[in-house]
Image (spheres, rainbow, N blue to C red):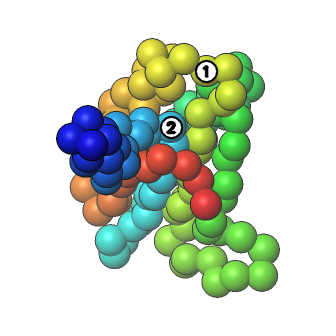
Amino acid sequence: MKKFTCFMIVGVVLSISAPAFAESRAVNISIGSIGGSLDNAALRTIRKVIGFAVGTGTVDKFIVYSPRVGSPIPIEGGLSACAEAGFGTSNRKFNAFIQELRSINPKPGTFYNIELIASCK
């Protein structure tokens, strides 16, 4: 009976901490202006990095949240999207993609955020 109780306690602890072991296999990307002009060179570079990742299979799912047909388009432009790792993509390859995104430094006046998530919604 003691073994069964210990087994149940360990099972509960592992099930509670399972999300802590989950991998980040997707990334939310957002770039926009905080008043003034948007750094279009940085936006083009982000699009090229994402396009290359999609073309090589590093990113399997790419969802654009904004701009989108039928929804309001920010005057300054920008991008809000999610990129998810491909089925056969190694963690090393996806992490290299994220590092390439993080290496982009837009000019002042442009915000740029990268957030790791478990998957695109």
Left or right: 69, with 59 as reference point:
right
Badge number at residue 99: none
Q: Position of residue 12 (x, y in %)?
A: 31, 51
Q: Position of residue 99 (x, y in %)?
A: 37, 27
Determine the residue positioned at 44% across, 57% down. Answer: 31
Q: Find the distance from the CA under tag 1 to the CA under tag 2.
A: 10 Å
Q: Where is residue 112 in the image (x, y as percent from the top left)?
A: 36, 54
Q: Which of 14 and 65 is in front in this view?
A: 14
Quadrant of the rendering where the N terminus is positioned: top left
* 113 up-or-down from 93: above or below: below
Picture quadrant of residue 90: top right
Residue type (three-letter) at the residue carrying disc 1: Thr
Mark 1 nearby-residue class (10 Å; few <14, some 14–19, many ≥20)? some
* Residue designated by label 1: 89
Quadrant of the rendering where the C terminus is positioned: bottom right
* 82 up-or-down from 7: above or below: below
Q: What element carries label 1?
A: loop
Quick one: label 1 or label 2, which is nearer the N terminus? 2
* Residue designated by label 2: 25
Q: Which of 43 and 23 is in front in this view?
A: 23
Residue 67 seen:
yes
Residue type (three-letter) at the residue carrying disc 2: Arg
